Image (cartoon, rainbow, N blue to C red):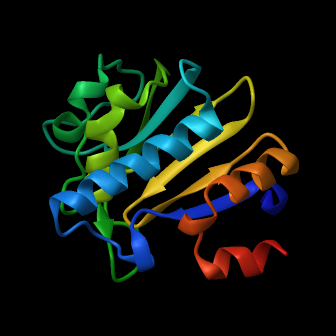
Amino acid sequence: MYPERWLRIHSLPHGQRYPTSGWHQKELVRRHSAVATDVLGGGAVCVLLLLRSCTGPESVGVGQRAAVTAGDLPDALSLSPELWDDESGWFAVPVGLLGAQVIWQPADFLGFIAAVADDRVRGVVANLATGGVYAPYDGGADLFFATEIERDLARARHAAWIPKLSEESET
């Protein structure tokens, strides 16, 4: 919707989707921490939005509140195997959106970054004051900056991490 503010990065060299070594895991965390802080701002008040199944014993119902900390993310908010249907590309069960106000500090979100990279959690972090959005997925992240100039500066800083397809579609 906002191609002039959008930038995509790869989590690993050569577009490798999943980490296969300790070095890969460290590189993935390094890249995601850097770009998320770039788009959100270190210490910024943000909103964390996560998808959660609305069925089963661990579901969060409409109108219910759930206290969640960054440390809870990998286990408490993991995707159940039946949540997503890879074949159809749609959710297999009803899902809800769980949100929380958070302070973006990369060290507090290492579990979130790892869980998203392993395709166990789906979520985004947004800085509502600036409009910056960090939307990680298994294999990379989509970033939405407040302005085209900020996007261009980030593209220059992280040029080695940008997929070729992303560069072609932005020009």
x, y percent for residue 83: 28, 59
Against 155, is 153 above or below?
Answer: above
Residue 159, quarter of picture: bottom right
Against 111, is 63 above or below?
Answer: above
x, y percent for residue 94: 36, 52
Image quarter where the C terminus lies is bottom right
Q: Residue at x 25, y 38 (%)?
A: 111
Q: Is residue 106 visible?
A: yes
Against 162, is 121 above or below?
Answer: above
Left or right: 126 in relation to 50: right
Q: Residue at x 44, y 24 (%)?
A: 105
Left or right: 2 in relation to 80: right
Q: Nearer the viewer, residue 13 or 138?
A: 13
Q: Nearer the viewer, residue 58 or 19?
A: 19
Q: Nearer the viewer, residue 146 or 32?
A: 32
Q: Residue at x 48, y 31 (%)?
A: 48
x, y percent for residue 75: 16, 38
x, y percent for residue 11: 42, 62
Q: Is residue 89 visible?
A: no
